[in-house]
Image (cartoon, grey):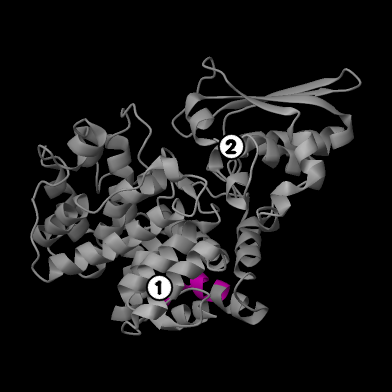
């Protein structure tokens, strides 16, 4: 199948008027969530370093750097804002992939601000980009290895197609943008727990803007860059993409069938099922650190591989440490942004409880559907009582959705890291009517801080 050509035809033909209402509704939720976590992430050191580099470049001032108080070029803004969007590991996921939106929205808003794009154009382009990413994920679902970080690889294609749509590229130009992207995509899992994890998203966003602008200017690439011999899929994934998901582009929408999975906690998503279970035990049974004898957390192979830190040495590592996170949930009754500083993860009381928490690989755990990442939490108390629960789905996905009030509360908590209360209220109100905006630049100005 001509995968690259099929994607290009879909992207060029995507029309706001024919997009299902549910897809547009979820797209607006994705925008709200992504902009919120990017504002919070803008105050992290990794995002500030990226912003510092952008300032040093003295580029054309056309696109806002969230929370930084200045503008730069669309390319530099996409890079810095994309990095910020994943800096807190608080951005939402998709059925088979983390961070599907984080490369797309920073790319779109940076390019769209430079163009004076409308809210409808942003939503239309986002749907084109998200569906491209989602269908590629489904087409490569049988890949057995685990070394590439998908937002930097597959996410780059989502950002590129979204930007191509915003620029109104024709099918041939979209094919060129996809071929160019195939030579820029990357991101390796060994960088989890360091600043270079969020940079995968920043590079994905920048790649999207750059590939689309190059294609618009006449730059060429292999027209079958995704499926060609020695192309993207063969080189990165050692397999040909499955035809069926690609054929469904424009006929079925992943934003409708699968939706997005919002994170209620600012840490690795594969820990959320266990956090949900522990918070439930705490609420129902009065679980406290003093009562705990031991806690076993049985997980699948993917979780065991990705949640790699047993004792966190830095705040970033704390986001991927099951013991630290569950100890925090028991002691504090929540997981919040302020728990991931280098000093916070050295809290002696938390680490003492974390020593009693053991994550174990359990090959017998079975996912009940594609959105499931099951784990089993067993708590043994000093008085002999035992509580155990297997959790298939974390809160925030279609199975256990967050309420509208919870989504707004998350945005507000995140935005407070960079904006004042008045600006937060205006951003919320503006996003609620995003599809009516004739120009997104006033919204972007609010995000500058």
> Is residue 87 on the magenta stretch?
no
Query: Residue farthest to the front?
Result: 313
Q: Are marks 2 and 1 in contact (CB under 8 Å)?
A: no
> What is the number of the mark on residue 309?
2
- From the top left corner, tell me how far across and down residue 223 is, in percent: 8, 51
From the viewer's perspective, tell me whether residue 291 is left or right of residue 418. Answer: right
Report the number of discs.
2
- Quarter the N terminus occupies: top left
Mark 1 highlights which residue?
53
**268 sits left or right of 284 in the view:** left
Does residue 429 show up magenta in the picture?
yes
Mark drawn on residue 232 = none
- Is 4 on the left-hand or right-hand side of 386? left
Is residue 440 at all visible to an observer of this figure?
no
Quadrant in the picture for residue 353 = top right
Q: Which residue is drawn at 39% across and 60% down?
A: 202
């Amino acid at each position: 199948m001509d995968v690259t050509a099929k994607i290009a035809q879909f992207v060029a033909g995507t029309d706001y008027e024919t997009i299902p209402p549910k897809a547009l509704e979820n797209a607006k939720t994705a925008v709200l969530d992504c902009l919120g976590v990017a504002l919070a992430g803008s105050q992290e050191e990794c995002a500030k370093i990226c912003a510092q580099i952008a300032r040093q470049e003295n580029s054309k001032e056309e696109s806002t750097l969230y929370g930084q108080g200045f503008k730069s070029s669309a390319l530099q803004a996409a890079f810095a804002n994309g990095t910020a969007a994943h800096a807190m590991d608080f951005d939402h996921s998709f059925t088979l992939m983390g961070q599907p939106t984080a490369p797309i929205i920073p790319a779109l808003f940076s390019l769209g601000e430079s163009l004076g794009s409308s809210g409808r154009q942003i939503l239309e382009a986002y749907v084109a980009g998200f569906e491209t990413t989602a269908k590629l994920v489904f087409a490569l679902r049988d890949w057995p290895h685990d070394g590439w970080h998908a937002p930097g690889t597959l996410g780059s294609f989502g950002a590129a197609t979204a930007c191509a749509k915003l620029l109104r590229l024709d099918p041939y130009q979209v094919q060129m943008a996809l071929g160019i992207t195939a030579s820029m995509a990357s991101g390796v899992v060994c960088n989890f727990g360091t600043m270079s994890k969020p940079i995968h998203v920043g590079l994905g966003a920048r790649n999207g803007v750059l590939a689309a602008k190059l294609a618009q200017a006449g730059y060429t690439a292999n027209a079958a860059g995704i499926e060609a011999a020695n192309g993207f899929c063969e080189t990165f994934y050692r397999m040909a993409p499955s035809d069926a998901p690609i054929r469904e582009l424009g006929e079925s929408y992943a934003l409708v069938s699968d939706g997005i999975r919002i994170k209620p906690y600012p840490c690795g998503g594969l820990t959320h099922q266990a956090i949900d279970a522990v918070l439930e035990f705490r609420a129902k049974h009065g679980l406290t650190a003093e009562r705990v004898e031991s806690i076993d957390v049985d997980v699948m192979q993917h979780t065991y591989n990705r949640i790699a830190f047993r004792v966190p040495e830095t705040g970033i590592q704390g986001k991927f440490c099951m013991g630290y996170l569950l100890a925090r949930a028991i002691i504090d009754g929540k997981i919040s942004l302020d728990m991931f500083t280098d000093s916070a993860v050295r809290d002696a009381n938390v680490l003492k409880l974390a020593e009693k928490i053991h994550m174990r690989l359990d090959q017998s755990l079975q996912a009940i559907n594609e959105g499931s990442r099951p784990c089993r939490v067993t708590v043994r108390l000093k008085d002999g009582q035992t509580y155990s629960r297997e959790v298939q789905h974390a809160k925030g996905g279609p199975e256990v959705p967050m309420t509208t009030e919870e989504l707004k509360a998350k945005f507000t908590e995140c935005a407070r890291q960079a904006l004042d209360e008045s600006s937060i209220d205006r951003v919320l109100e503006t996003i609620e009517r995003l599809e009516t905006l004739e120009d997104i630049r006033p919204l972007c100005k609010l995000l500058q801080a």
